[in-house]
Image (spheres, rainbow, N blue to C red):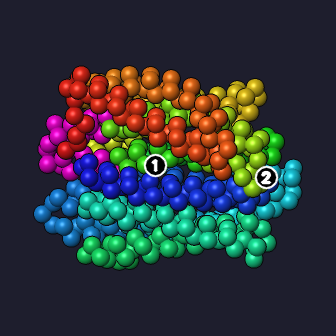
Amino acid sequence: MLSKILSVGGWTLVSRVTGFLRDACMAAIMGAGPVTDAFVVAMRIPNHFRAIFAEGAFNAAFIPKYSRLLAGADRSGAALFAAHIFSLVLMFQAVILVLALIGMPWLVYALTFGFPEDPSRYDLAVALSRITFPYLLFVTLVTVLSGILNAHGRFAAAAAAPVIMNVTMVAALLVSVHFPTAGHAAAWGFCLAGVLEFLLLYGAVRRAGLSVGLKKPVLSPDMREFFRALGPAVIGSAGIQIAMFADTLIASLLPTGAVSSIYYADRLYQLPVGVIAIAVGTVLLPEMSRKLGTGDESGAFAAQNRAAALTFVLTVPFFVAFLTLPDLILTALFKRGAFNFEAARAAADVLFAYAAGLPAVMLIRSAVAGFYARQDTRTPVIASLIAVALNVVLKIILVGPLGAPGLALATSLGAWLNLGILLSLGLRRRTLRPDRSLALYCLAAALAALPLAAFALTAPGPAAVALAGYPWPEGLTLMAVGAAGALLYAAALVALFKLFRLRLKIR
């Protein structure tokens, strides 16, 4: 299991590194003005729908059912089930695409009440959204193919797919002079990425000796069971997206640049979420599903606890860095070209607010896996919808005094409530069984965070003075402080693991 997590996490890290290059190009070429605001909206619209109907919701319903069919005597039933799902998704997304292209002006208006007050920004957002929306069709099919591969223990291709988007968008931005705006270039790169990701995953499925043909969907017992699990999962995902819709909508009412600030801060915030939490969740769900399918409940709990321990231990350095060094991080990574110091400072404030909820966001993936592996998609919905309700209310309350950081802080508080409800219900319904070693791992990581935080608060000043005469002083300062901080945290962990007699090993 650990090797699979490292494989997914490794590819996700490559994706995040290339994603940083993409965002750096965007920041330098597009800045944090109206073109970036319009493109961010155009990119978020298909991503919102993808998050509702694909990814988490789809995998929660598809992977446990498909894994159980694979474990049965007749494996052909699994292939037929996959073909029915693939065909149904293709038909559904084709209809959604046509409707969205026709109704895009109304869709953009519904998500950005503040944009119509600036007609040029609104018109640009509509035009770019029509270019980006076809991405949804291809990436949803990619989700189906990824679920099939994950259930067979093949994770690399799906984890590598997002790299394609980053590369195509960078390439498009580099030739943006040939497009009406840099936003048009980025939008076409985004759309092309969906096609290339689909081709990559389809080829991986074929190389694995699997096939996904087109079959007329039939409402079989397996399909009914899938939809019974999918319905609550979609509602839960929709709830989360409502909170994100609220971010986009409320931010559109703020001064120009607020949408961009949230975007750049969120991109950094998503680094540990993608590299650690999503990688762990991607591997943990099929792992627990297989163990529960064979009656190995103790093994399923052990996998879940070790996954949560690994997640928390690796989350702590990011949590400390985002709380103590947000200005240095944003300035070093993005302050160049059209992205000035004021833009970096605004995004840093948002990152600081997001950081408050990072541990909760990271651990939610491990918590929900226990429910999803048992095909219980309803319980996470309860937690999600309650948290979303609080999230949206807090956004409305906090945006006035705090602006864009208030939206991020509301997200953080909602994440903690979501995790708290999941833990409470999981313990009550016995989908969670924390053990002593998990508590000790978390205690060790929390103690190791103390010297790391003290170092992060005091080291940047002297490092900046020592490196002031070199090119890119902010970047060198960040690298020096980051490398030294990582060594300090690792040394503290090793000492504490020896003290507590722990070994971080996941079987």
Judge from the rendering whether residue 430 lies leftward or rightward of residue 479; answer left or right.
left
343, above or below 67, in the image: above
In magenta, the rendered stretch is 282-309
Residue drawn at x 86%, y 53% is 118
Query: Residue 155, position in %: x, y?
Result: 33, 60
Query: Residue 428, position in %: x, y?
Result: 30, 25
Three-letter amino acid code at the position of disc 1:
Gly
Q: Which residue is mark 2?
A: 33
Residue drawn at x 36%, y 69% is 84
- For the question of whether residue 311 can be seen, the reply is yes
Mark toward the start of the polypeptide (1 vs 2): 2
Q: Which residue is mark 1?
A: 274
Q: Main secondary structure of the magenta part?
A: helix
Judge from the rendering whether residue 71 lies leftward or rightward of residue 342; answer left or right.
left
Res. 197 mark: none
- Tell whether position 305 is magenta: yes
Three-letter amino acid code at the position of disc 2:
Gly
Task: Identify which residue, 344 or 400, lies in the foreground.
Answer: 344
255, above or below 90, in the image: above
Task: Identify which residue, 506 or 252, lies in the foreground.
Answer: 506
Res 451 quadrant in image = top left
Res 255 quadrant in image = top right
Query: Residue 404, position in %: x, y?
Result: 71, 36
